[in-house]
Image (cartoon, grey):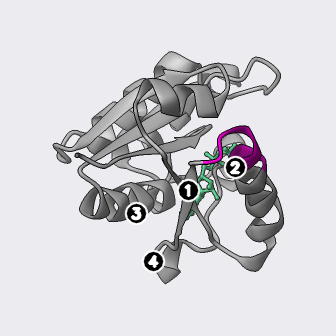
């Protein structure tokens, strides 16, 4: 049976840290689905279709990685994908509080689910989409934190707003 893992997140935008996690997961599982969340209560810089396009562009070289959007309950999505594996990234100890709560909650909702935590390379442990958005908004280049495609999109997004 092939092992399908789902990596959910906002990816607003995808960073090199997210990509590092996706690459690691793609080596561990037969198929990885990056599930871009479409949460109406969160205010995003990029629309869900823009975030989807960004993840698709970045993961094109990885044949066993698919991209999808998700708007309902994560555990329902896992069931439709016939997956029991959730991937999450852990950067620093402070991530743990939230991530453990989320993992426990998901296990309450679907007892067979296993959340697999992956650590990125050291160079990405400080990196967060929120920081990238903030510096882009203030006019700084983001090339070292995101792919060239995302850096261009951020530039366009924030120069259009000035
Ligand atoms: P969410 O809103 O679901 O937290 P994010 O896009 O912020 O969505 O993050 C998705 C997942 O990727 C989370 O598990 C988060 O901890 C992880 N993540 C975010 N940035 C990094 C990074 N630089 N390195 C490793 N994992 C990361």
Q: Is residue 82 above or below residue 63?
A: above
| Residue under label 2 | 107
| Position of residue 112 measured from the top left corner of the image (x, y, whole percent) | 57, 48
Q: Is residue 43 above or below residue 146?
A: above
The secondary element bearing badge 4 is classed as loop
CA separation, marks 1 and 4? Answer: 22 Å
Residue drawn at (61%, 34%) of the image = 75
| Residue under label 1 | 114
CA separation, marks 2 and 1? Answer: 7 Å
Counting residues from the N terminus, which is met first, the one under dot 2 or under dot 3? Answer: 3
| Residue under label 4 | 121
The magenta segment? 105-111
The answer to whether any part of residue 130 appears in the image is no
| Residue under label 3 | 20
The secondary element bearing badge 1 is classed as strand
- Cβ of mark 4 under 8 A from ligand 1: no
Callout 2 crowding tier (Cα within 10 Å): few <14, some 14–19, many ≥20: some
């Amino acid at each position: 049976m092939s092992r399908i893992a789902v990596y959910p997140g906002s990816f607003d935008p995808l960073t090199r840290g997210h990509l590092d996690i996706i690459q690691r997961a793609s080596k561990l599982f037969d198929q990885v689905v990056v599930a871009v969340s479409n949460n109406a209560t969160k205010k995003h810089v990029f629309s869900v279709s823009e975030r989807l396009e960004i993840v698709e562009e970045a993961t094109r070289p990885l044949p066993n990685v698919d991209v999808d959007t998700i708007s309902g309950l994560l555990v329902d999505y896992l069931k439709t994908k016939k997956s029991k594996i959730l991937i999450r990234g852990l950067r620093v100890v402070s991530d743990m509080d939230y991530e453990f709560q989320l993992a426990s909650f998901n296990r309450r909702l679907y007892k067979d689910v296993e959340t697999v935590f992956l650590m990125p390379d050291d160079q990405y442990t400080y990196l967060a989409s929120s920081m990238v958005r903030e510096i882009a908004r203030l006019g700084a280049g983001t090339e070292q934190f995101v792919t060239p495609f995302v850096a261009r999109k951020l530039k366009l997004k924030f120069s259009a707003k000035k």
